[in-house]
Image (tube, grey):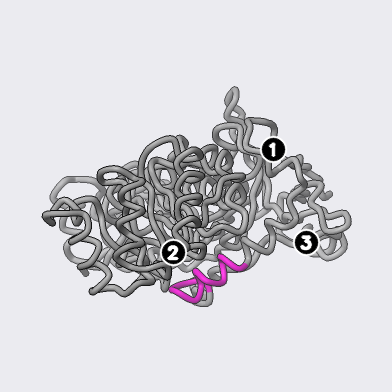
């Protein structure tokens, strides 16, 4: 089973499983919740990403001969646990925030319901995916807001692990980037790809002019020429002389970008290339993009900053048991009470309170049991935030693949319009809206 994702987990998930099988609590109905206690880096909102990837990974969370052999040979679990895992398939249910949705501290981003054994083993996988992808998406959304209508291209593959790079490209696209340099992301997720040439292309040739002529012959005049390998002014002059005033674009990857962009725009216009676009790269983040808002820049390429969450590579999400049945079959809310790490017990239903289309609060209804939420949930008002991803083991495939990715992007761009103005600022601050818990008796 080469596609198995079952060992993409921490050992203690399986040791807890083994112990629960031994003491009889493995079958106890339980509710786990994935949430973030705070927003990393003083961000004012977070963006949920990775859910579509997670669903596909859960489908492949099976223990084949190779996985079972590894567990047995390394004495990870006992024989009874191996027999259980041999037939493991997640048969519970998962609800949560749609991919691309905004989230805030305490938002019940993902709710996993099933037996303790069913749900506990998914902890590491769920956190691995959502912590990474949501961190990238949150940074990417901030960059997209700073860029306004100017397009953003993700080009950070060389700054991330090979599979993380593909996931990061997907998360950035969901959060507002328009394209990626990563071909696997294009193939797997249907993201538009882009890319022309690096400095090595110019250095390969005996002159900058020869390099430009060859690129034009290969890709046509609508290509983008990299003009800063040597002298930028000379590069621009050479580019227009070779390609003509119909050159698609020039790219600048160095220098004081506001100053250089202004000079290049002036030079292009003087040469008659008034429609030639200017793309800037060079270690951009949301702050650098915002600083270029008044500059004559047409597009941005972002690498390191976006794939590393712009300094915050994890969303700091956690996965906690919040409700379970007791020995009598009654539901009880459970919560961790540790200092600075307390959780809010109980099953939850979440809504976004809106006034004139603007978000004012994250309202979370809390109850021990399921049935108590059925009535109030339909009358609380606000926009419901949770959908069903897996129902009794059956995955809703609408959230997966290229179509699911495109849908997540559309959803994000739509709900981002609900943010209050203060949420658009880049400075560190409190969350843009409060999270309000409402206990349902």
CA separation in Å, label 1 and label 2: 29 Å
The crowding category of the residue bearing disc 1, from other C-alpha atoms within 10 Å (few below 14, some 14 to 19, many at least 20), is some
Q: Mark 3 points at which residue?
A: 383
Report which quarter residue 80 is drawn in: bottom left
Question: Which numbered dot is residue 431?
Answer: 1
CA separation in Å, label 3 and label 1: 19 Å
Q: Name the residue under label 2.
A: 179
Report which quarter residue 63 is drawn in: bottom left
The image shows residue 39 at horizontal and vertical percentages of: 59, 37
The crowding category of the residue bearing disc 2, from other C-alpha atoms within 10 Å (few below 14, some 14 to 19, many at least 20), is many
Closer to the camera, 274 or 359? 274
Magenta span: predominant SS is helix
Closer to the camera, 431 or 239? 239
The crowding category of the residue bearing disc 3, from other C-alpha atoms within 10 Å (few below 14, some 14 to 19, many at least 20), is some
Q: Earlier in the sequence, mark 3 or mark 2?
A: 2
Q: Which residue is drawn at 77% across and 59% down?
A: 373
Query: On screen, 133 above or below 85?
Result: above
The image shows residue 79 at horizontal and vertical percentages of: 23, 54
Magenta region, residue range:
399-410
Q: Which of marks 3 and 1 is in front?
A: 1
Report which quarter residue 401 is drawn in: bottom left
Q: Which of marks 1 and 2 is nearer the N terminus?
A: 2
Does dot 3 land on a helix, a strand or a loop?
Answer: strand
Residue 84 forms part of the magenta stretch: no
């Amino acid at each position: 089973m080469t596609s198995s994702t079952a060992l993409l987990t921490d050992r203690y998930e399986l040791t807890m499983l083994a112990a629960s099988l031994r003491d009889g609590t493995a079958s106890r109905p339980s509710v786990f919740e994935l949430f973030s206690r705070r927003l990393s880096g003083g961000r004012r909102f977070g963006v949920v990403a990775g859910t579509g990837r997670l669903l596909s990974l859960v489908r492949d969370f099976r223990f084949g001969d190779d996985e079972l052999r590894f567990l047995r040979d390394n004495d990870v679990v006992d024989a009874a646990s191996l027999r259980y895992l041999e037939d493991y398939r997640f048969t519970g249910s998962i609800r949560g925030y749609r991919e691309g949705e905004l989230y805030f501290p305490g938002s019940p981003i993902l709710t996993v319901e099933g037996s303790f054994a069913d749900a506990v083993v998914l902890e590491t996988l769920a956190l691995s995916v959502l912590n990474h992808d949501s961190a990238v998406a949150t940074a990417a959304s901030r960059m997209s807001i700073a860029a306004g209508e100017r397009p953003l291209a993700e080009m950070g593959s060389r700054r991330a692990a090979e599979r993380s790079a593909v996931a990061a490209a997907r998360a950035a696209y969901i959060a507002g980037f328009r394209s990626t340099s990563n071909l696997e992301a294009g193939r797997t997720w249907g993201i538009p790809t882009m890319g022309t040439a690096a400095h090595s292309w110019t250095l390969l040739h005996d002159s900058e002019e020869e390099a430009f002529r060859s690129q034009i012959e290969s890709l046509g005049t609508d290509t983008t020429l990299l003009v800063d390998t040597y002298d930028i002014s000379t590069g621009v002059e050479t580019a227009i002389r070779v390609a003509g005033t119909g050159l698609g674009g020039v790219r600048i990857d160095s220098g004081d970008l506001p100053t250089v962009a202004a000079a290049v725009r002036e030079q292009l216009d003087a040469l008659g290339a008034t429609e030639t676009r200017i793309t800037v790269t060079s270690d951009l983040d949301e702050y650098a993009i915002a600083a270029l808002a008044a500059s004559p820049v047409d597009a941005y390429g972002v690498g390191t900053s976006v794939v590393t969450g712009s300094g915050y590579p994890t969303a700091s999400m956690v996965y906690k048991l919040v409700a379970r049945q007791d020995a009598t079959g009654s539901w009880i809310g459970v919560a961790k009470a540790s200092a600075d790490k307390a959780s809010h017990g109980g099953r939850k239903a979440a809504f976004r309170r809106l006034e004139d289309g603007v978000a004012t609060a994250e309202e979370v209804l809390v109850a021990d049991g399921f049935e108590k939420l059925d009535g109030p949930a339909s009358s609380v008002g606000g926009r419901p935030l949770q959908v069903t991803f897996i129902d009794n083991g059956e995955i809703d495939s609408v959230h997966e693949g290229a179509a699911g990715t495109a849908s997540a992007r559309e959803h994000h761009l739509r709900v981002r319009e609900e943010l209050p103005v203060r949420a658009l600022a880049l400075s560190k601050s409190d969350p843009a809206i409060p999270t309000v818990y409402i206990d349902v008796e």
